[in-house]
Structures are given as C-alpha cells and as structure tokens.
Amino acid sequence: MSNIGVIISLIIISGGLLAILIYSLRGRDVDRRIIFLFVFIAVASAVLFNIEFKEHPTLIVKKVFDKIENLPSGSRVLISFDYDPAMKPEVHPMANSFVRHCLVKGHKLCLMSLWPQGQALMTETLEEVILEEFPEARYGEDYVMLGYKAGNEGVLNVIITDFRKMYATDARGTNIDSIPIFKEIKSAKDMDLILPIGGGKPGPKEWILFVGDPGNVPVAPGLAAVVAPLIYPYYPKQAIGLLGGVKGAAEYESELRQKYPRFRDVYAPALRMMGPQTLAHIVIMAFIVIGNIAFFRRKRSETGA
Amino acid sequence: MRKGPVIITAVVVCLFIVSWIIKAVNVPAEDSVFRAFAQGFGVTFAAFLTLAVMSFLYRDNPFYKFAEHLYVGVSAAYAMSLGFWTTIVGNLFPRISEGLCNWFEVPYTEFEWHFLIPPALGIILLMRLSPKGGWISRWALAFIVGTTAGLNLPRFLRSDFIEQISATFLPLLVNWHGIGDFFSNLSLSASGQLVSILTNVVIVVGVFCGIVYFFFSKEHKGAFGAASRFGIWILMITFGASFGYTVMGRISLLVGRLTFLGHDWLGLITR
C-alpha cells in the first residue's frame, strides 16, 4: 500500500510540476496558491500512505544519545520544556524520546518549563510516556515536575545558585524539601546533564549562557529547526551535541529503537514525519529549479529582443 | 446583507454540528454522554480552528480572524493564570504570609521581607494604566531594563564572545602523525581524521573570511577582496542552511496538523 502510495503521489506531483514548467516557460506567472497546493499534496499523500524512510544518527545526535547512555544509573537529568503548541510537532518527539531514554537507563528526571504552555505539554509527556510506559517509575524518587516558573533567564540565574529560592514547591504544591530527588540537589550545578528543548526565548541558548557555561554543566539542546543554525556554533564546546528540528528527533528515535527493542512498537512521530518532509522538500526544490529556468529564459529573451 | 458569506457560514456551522455528533457517537461506550459530547466538541473545534487558520493561505477571511484572535486571547489568559498559580501562589505567598498559604493550601516556608519588593514593583508597573500616575511605572521599567542588561552583559560576554573566539582557535591538523599515517587511515567517517581536519579548516577560514567581509576600513581588492568574496559565499551558504531549516520546521508543523486531521478527526490514518 505504501509503495503504491509513493508511486501514485510521485506521478501526480511530477505531472503537475511538468505542467507548471511548461506553463511558466510560456512566460506566465504561477499563482502562489498553486505552490501551496503542491506542497499540501506532497505532505498529505505521504501522511496518508505512511511513507517512511530509514534514519541513521549523525555524529552530533549520536553524542547526545551516547551521553545519556553512558551516564551511570541514578544520574540527575534536567529536561526543560521551553516551547508551546506551535513548536510541538517538531520538538515534542524529542522530549518524549529523552524521557524514555532517561527512564529506561534509571536516571532521575527533573522536568521544568520556562514557557507557560510548556507545563501543559509536560503533563502530556507525563500521561502518555511516563504513566503509560513506565508505571513502575515513582513520583519524587524517579522523576519530579517542577512546572512553569515566570522570569525567563532570571529563573536560570537563580537556580544556578539555589533551586529552593525559586521553587518552594513542585508543580503539585509539595514542599521541595520533602521530595527525595531534591535531597542531593541544591542548584542546577548538581545536575549531570541538562536537556533544554525549545526554539524561542528563553530557550536552549539561555540555558547555555546562564547555566551550562557558568555552572560547567553539560548541555545538550533539542531545537526547533528555525533556531538550530543559531545554536550550532556552541557545538562541541558549549553544547555536547544537539538535535536540530524533526530530522534530529527522527535520528534519535531511530537510535532509541535500534538500541532498545521495547521501543520498536512505540509510536515514533518524528520518524513518520520524515516521509512528508522528503516529498515536500523535493517539491520545493523542483519549484526553485522551475523558477530559475523561467527567470533565465525570460532574461535571455529580453536581452535577445 | 450579501448571500455568499451567509451561505458559507451556514455550511460551516452545519458541517461542524455533523462532525460533532459523529465524533461524539464514536467515543467508546464506557464514557458518559456528557463526556462523549465534550470530547467530540473538543476534537471538532480543534479541527475547525486548524482549517480556519489554513484558510488564510487562500485569502484573509473572518474564520481566520476568529481563530487568530481566539489563540491570542486564550494564550494570554493561560499564561496569566498559570503565572498567578506558579509564581504568586507557588513562590511569593510561601515567603510572605502563612494565612495566604493556608488559604491556597501551599506549604509556608518562612517570611523573607525582600520578597515584598517584586509585588511592589508589579503594582508600580500597573500604574501605567492610570492617566495621572503613568510616569511612576517608568521606575519599574527602568529596574527591568537595568537588571536584564546587567544580568545579560557578563553572560553574553563570556559565552558569545570569549568562548566563541576560543572555539575558533582550532588545530588545522587533527591527530596528525605524519602523511603516511594520514593516508593509511583515510576514512570518510564523520569522526575520522580527514573530516575533522576539513571541518576545522572550514570553521577557521569561514570565520576569518566572514570577518574580512565586514571590515570596511580597507578597500576590498586583491587578496583582501578575494577573502571578502569568499566570506560573502560563506554567509550565503549560512543563510541557505537557515532557510532550509526554516522550511523543515514549517513543514513539520503542517505534518503535525495534517496528522491530527487525518487521525484524530477523520480517523483515516493509524499510528
């Protein structure tokens, strides 16, 4: 079904693109809505026919995976959900993969958010991943939810010296001193790894600037594609590795499935997204080529005349 | 009143009701009727908002405007209420009042007088709403601007300036043990010697030429001009990579919404 779907989609898209090429070579302008329609067809057909491709982790993603993999069991890992529903499709799979990987390795998880909407998405991860796949994980001992705190980088500036000054309670209103995980944690410097996920401000950049560098804590961000090129310069010195957009998330999911067979049947949204991504990118590249051919042909005919 | 918009609105409302009923009927039987209709409404309304926002690609329309305003309003209200419960109730009350802590059922820690300063500044900031006392809010704003600048300056200076410069001082020959060793261990692996050397060369040359392009005190001619031209190529490639990533991000969002429409709303695709 999938193969037939690929063939049908490619025939429709190629035929349409050829028609547009001929149309534009005749000197006519193509309406922008035609481009939207083609991108929509490419994405919708790949989603409908479930087109998937194999992913292999690149070095920059593998370093994040290996870091979590090689930390001794019981290490303290902080995951910050610094995003909102607008970024969810590309970065939420990263958060779920990080949580799965950390819990399967027996790390202690501390979940927090610098974005108000991040708390709802954190709760989603709690319900869909932690409670469903790891019912044996105990709240307060294996993981804790600190929730959202307003203050942007001000929050980071405080927790680098003392968590308790910013968090008197966790997200459920429990006194932080009565939570077992926090018996050995005074500040963010006591974390063995920080995994900030997001793509805005405050986000991964602020975590590097306000916690990673001054506290000498390893930071491995999961990034929305839009900001990934801005964070690449921090690799490898200030960020041990990073996940850039849905491609990074898909590579991580693939590596997690490869290493842990128990996750092979778990829904991997980022891997599922790579099929539509590939088809959509082919269409966009085709439009760039068509646009350039039409431009140079028109220019040539104008100079010739 | 024109007939067209009325007919379109009527069709949208009818489709909405039909979808709501179908979704409510398909909810598992163990759920209560009220819960089934609430769930059906939630999915149908989310699908309607998705389609309303996407309709902007065709042209601006009232459905898009409705979805846009609703999003802004709900986001602001959500952030405000969450800010109240997590920051004021969760962080401020435990430090200033045992009575308030008992009222909101949060644990009291101890009285810390300096926690009274932020709410005072907050009230001063709200004076902006007063026609006569608006100028007072400038004090709180000045505090915000001053502390933000003060906090950011040393962090940016360290992480974005000093650390970035030191990250550019890279060896052009990585793990070099002679030409024979280099060719006998030649590999195209990402962690291999050849790729590591090429990576460092690209970083060092790219940074140098990029800076040369922005150096305007000398005319861009000869070797200097060549370095400048190479610098602009590096910048263009960077912008291209950024554009590529942006496209990937936007397509991801489209995939996310289409997956929602196909799976949660229409039930056409499986996970």
Image (cartoon, rainbow, N blue to C red):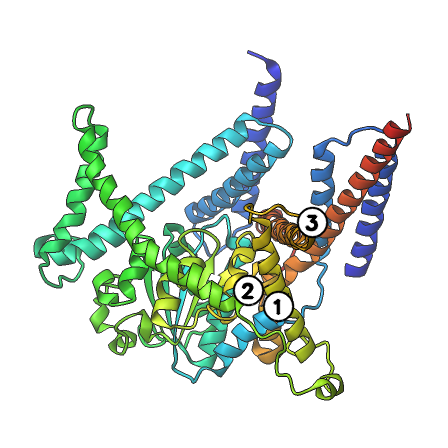
CA gap, disc 3 and disc 2: 23 Å
Q: Which label's residue is closer to the chain start, 1 or 3?
A: 3
Secondary structure type for disc 3: helix
Question: Quick check: A213 left or right of B169?
Answer: left
Q: Nearer the viewer, mark 1 or mark 3?
A: 1
Q: Which label's residue is closer to the chain start, 3 or 2?
A: 3
CA gap, disc 1 and disc 3: 20 Å
Q: Nearer the viewer, mark 2 or mark 1?
A: 2
Residue B163 seen in the current view: yes
**Disc 2 sits on a residue from what chain?**
A
Question: Quick check: A81 left or right of A271?
Answer: left
The residue that disc 2 covers is: A243
Up/down of B141 relative to B6, above or below: below
Q: Nearer the viewer, mark 3 or mark 2?
A: 2
Q: Amino acid at mark 1?
A: Glu
Residue B96 % position (x, y)? 11, 54
The residue that disc 1 covers is: A251
Of A152 and B47, the residue lying toward us:
A152
Q: Which label's residue is closer to the chain start, 2 or 1?
A: 2
- Residues under numbered marks 2 and 1 in contact, where contact means CB atoms less than 8 Å apart: yes
Q: Give the position of the N terminus of chain B as an image quadrant.
A: top right
The residue that disc 3 covers is: A43
- The residue sitting at the right extreme is A304
